[in-house]
Image (cartoon, rainbow, N blue to C red):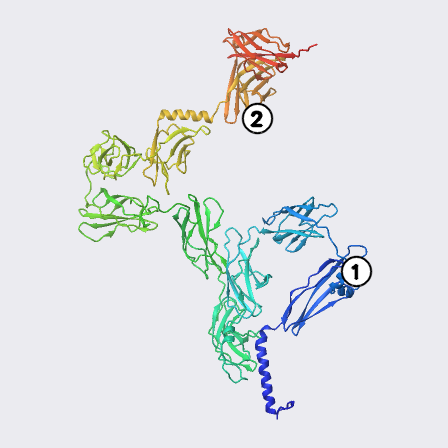
Amino acid sequence: MDNFIGLPGLSSSGYKLHRAHVRTKRLDKYVHEEPMIRGPKFLVRLRSHTVFEHTPVKLFCTVEGFPMPVVSWCSTDDTAQYTAVAGNLHGQASSQASIVVKSKNHNNLLLHSPVSATTLLLLLSSPCLLAAMLPQIHYTKINITFLERFGPVFATEGESATLSATMILNPNLANLQPEAQWYRDDTRLFDSKWVKIETGRGVTTLTLPNLYKDDEGLYTLRMVTKGGTAEHSAFVSVAVPAAPGAPMDIKIHDANRDYVIVSWKPPNTTTEGPILGYFVDKCEVGTENWTQCNDHPIKICKYPVSGLFESHSYYFRVRAVNSHGISKPSRMSDPIAALDPTEFERLHGGFSWITEGKPPGVPAGVHATEIDRTYVVLSWKAPAYSSKAPMWYYIEKCMADSGAWQRVNTKVPIRSPRYAVFDLAEGKQYKFRVLSANIYGTSEPSQPTGTIETLQLKGVPSAPGQVIATRETDSSVLIQWAPPKEPNNLIGYYIDQCVKGSKNWTSANHKPHRSTRFVVSGLTKGETYVFRVQAINELGLSEESQESAPLTVKAALSQYCPVVSAAPSAPYDIALLNCDGHSMVLNWKKPLHSGGAKIREYYVDKRRSGTTMWREVNVAPFSERLYKVEGLTEGAVYQFHVYAANLAGLGRASQHSADFNCEAWTMPEPGPAYDLTFCEVRDHSVVVEWQKPVYTGSGPITGYHVEYAKKGSSDWTTANETAVNHLFYKVTGLEVGTTYVFRVRAVNAAGVGMASMASDPVTAKAVEGSHEVSCEVDKKSGDIVLSFESCQINEGSQFIWKKDYKEITDFSKGVEIKSEGHHSKLIFKTADKEDFGTYSVSVTNTEGVSSSYTISAEELAKMLALSYDIRHPIIPLKSELAYKILERGRMRFWLQAEEISPKVTYKFFANNKELSGPNKMGHDVSTGIIEFIMDHFTEENEGTFTCQITDGGGKAQSSLVLIGNGNEDRGKVVGGLPDVVTIMEKKTLSLTCTVCGDPKPQVSWLKNGAEVEPDDQYVVSLDQGKFASLTIKGVSMEDSGRYTMIVQNKYGGESVDIVVSVTAVYHK
């Protein structure tokens, strides 16, 4: 018999029904309220206050929790600290705030009378009573106007930053100045080692002398007065040098009641250091509080975030870490709710009534939906279950080779048919099974899964294979590469680019690219680049691939390559150049259209005449348009056709050749020349070029004849009656606007040989706007320069320089080519007398733009002499080397140059022996005088004296002969000049003397070391070669000084000094 406490008016059966009804209500309440149960939490905490006395204060806070928390206020009698305590059945939380009251006068009621905290609380809580007790206070209003404000700052760690603001105060009272307060993200800053604050005279400045990442934030200046505040804010961003970029493509997987799995893609590290790991941050929707999910950096690009609150929504973001610092956060993910995936369906689905009190059925279909290195995500089918009692699941695992089952979630019940099992061993095999449970019991275990092996860390991918760059447009390039041999869960590729010759690698893409083809855009036209590729998986970046071959950015197609297909057109005009009975040498003309890429390969097919089956002649491709076909049958007749190929593919086959009979050539005359081309097409002339014959006949080739005919005519005219011995010829006498074809015949001792195949037609008309090559000697460097300006330039155009119509490829002898835009120069740095000849230039990818210049031996000699003079300039001299006899047997040798620099060097020689020792040398830059004083001059010192001067690139030399009769015949002063002259102002001074010498000497005058320039006031004369004079008209005080007269001829000379003193005129 059941024991129960009876209720009035209820029978035993009635009580059972009542108890079942109560249990049902409790289950309903549990089902609906269980997800909401949580302890109290302060969403807005109490804030401390600092106030003046007699000011009302209100304390606010916001609390959440379920059931609704009860809030109580506490205070201590001897402190000004107040506490709010919130509690419910599931815990309690508290928040504290302090109130500091400042005094304004000595009659302060609160500060100068013993008031307890309880009394203060009463006053604070009764603002009406307090307002009635205190008088209204009026503060002086100070208007603050910012004249100059600081703006946002973007700096790098280690640099300094200064924030400054200028303001006007109205009124500006000396004893009532505002207080400048600086804040970083609402945290007040004070003067310290890391922050320097200066305020005064309407200017306040904050200096950060050594920036760190911690200094980043929103800086606010608050100018505080009793009447209010004025503030201004700006952001300071501090970048970490070489820190990685932000991760990308944040995605959320397997969102559940209490966990999600976050994945992302790593950033490209072109110039930064390798990434060491990642931090994952989360933020609840509706707040701005980001919290870090992992304490240590994780190295793979996937992380399970657990510990989430059910029914809450979250944002996630990721930061990368390397040895230099932490990257900026990635773009945050879309909001994701922590919910059971089946919650919505279960809450909104229909239920059928079944008898309560039974455990749930067995789960079915347990399988792994995702397998990683350390976790497995399981999914299963829920059992048929419609009870209102909540159902949950237990997961069990065991090693594949063991039967020992271990429960995974003993403390955390699982309520959705999907769960991630973490903390598994890498590369191990497991089995899993699921049990369902409710308050009535636990079901039987489900069927175990098959063997599930966790992934094993294999590392980053291997480096991609060969990288090939091809032209796309004038600002883009197509990059192709081979995939890595070991992809290891490849995510994609990063492509880097670099200008040739530099090491400044930059990223071409900032998101992983899946394909092995990528178009790099935004390149500089005409610049040369190299490229490399890195593969990436969730563990990081592979090694870099090998660099591609350098490629200049140019358009693949132009108006001169109008073929829509990228493959070349067909070759044409196949010619037979030689046959020995078993082989034939063939030549053909290159395709008219290359397809936008260089033609790299040719293929030749053959067939017997009269048959249709073509056979390959060459399996391996070749690049020349001259090919020897071997293995032929003597006497047979063959036909040939040719294919051309570029990087885009194989072009069309040429038309088949004429019938070629395989019989050995034995004629004594030469075979045909080939490859006829044109340049320098003008109105009445054209230059024809060709290649010498392969078959030379019975003797060496002695010359060539050029023949021409009008297009469509068979009347051939020989352009040169006398054979030329070179491979080019200028044909003249053509009619302007007429189209011609040309052919060439080689000549040897046996006679004139076979004619070449006729050339392509060419019209005798100059290209409109064409220029000719000019030649000059550079006035600064002394280089001989050939210059050409092209009237046309297109994509892919190049300047080709030739000497005697052979391309210049040897640049070891100081020859240099410089081309830029429409201009090109051929520069001879070290030209010699063998460099005469005809120099021509042609511009590819144009309408035949070309020109030439012939340098004769005589012209070259003149240019070499001019080049030498420019490179070895002569320093001009005002006066040649002269001498003057001084006292005590000393001799002064001197000369004067037009101009010398402080770096001038010089040497004096006597009879080719350098003078040195105790003798004195010196110079004066201002006057250009260089002198040498010999202490003892005797007859033994007679001979030739020389001074050699070097100043920069210039040189000069002057000699003086003191030998034999030279001493008697040298220039000298006979007499007539005084040593000192005194004269009054405004008078005329005449200095006159007699000079002699053979030959007649030259006379010059100096004033204070500077040459006297003749003019209306200074008159210099030399009559009959012996009467010299200097006349100064209207002398003034400025004419006082030392005057020197210099007399010299080829044997030498001398100088005489006269001191002139001009005195002022005094009036009584």
Helix, strand or loop under label 2: loop
Relative placement, left or right, of 293 versus 545 is right
The circle drawn on residue 868 is none
Residue 500 placed where, x, y %?
45, 45
Instruction: Residue at 69%, 61% (x, y): give it.
Output: 47
Q: Is residue 714 above or below residue 650?
A: above
Crowd class of label 2 (few under 14; some 14 to 19; many from 20; radius 10 Å): few
Residue furthest out toward the bottom: 1
Pointer 1 residue: 110
Q: Nearer the viewer, residue 623 or 1047?
A: 1047
User: Mark 2: which amino acid?
Assistant: Pro
Question: Is tag 2's residue or tag 1's residue first in the polypeptide sequence?
Answer: 1
The label nearer to you, 2 versus 1, is 1
User: Mark 1: which amino acid?
Assistant: Leu
Relative placement, left or right, of 342 versus 734 is right
Which quadrant of the view contains residue 727?
top left
Quadrant assignment for the N terminus: bottom right
Residue 327 placed where, x, y %?
55, 55
Relative placement, left or right, of 958 versus 41 is left
Instruction: Residue at 56%, 65% (x, y): give it.
Output: 314
Q: Nearer the viewer, residue 389 or 363?
A: 389
How many numbered badges does the structure rendering display? 2
Q: Is residue 197 above or below residue 734?
A: below
Residue 953 placed where, x, y %?
50, 27
Q: Is residue 80 above or below residue 844?
A: below
In this view of the protein, can residue 730 be seen by the observer? no
Q: Nearer the viewer, residue 43 or 969?
A: 43
Crowd class of label 1 (few under 14; some 14 to 19; many from 20; radius 10 Å): some
Pointer 2 residue: 902
Helix, strand or loop under label 1: loop
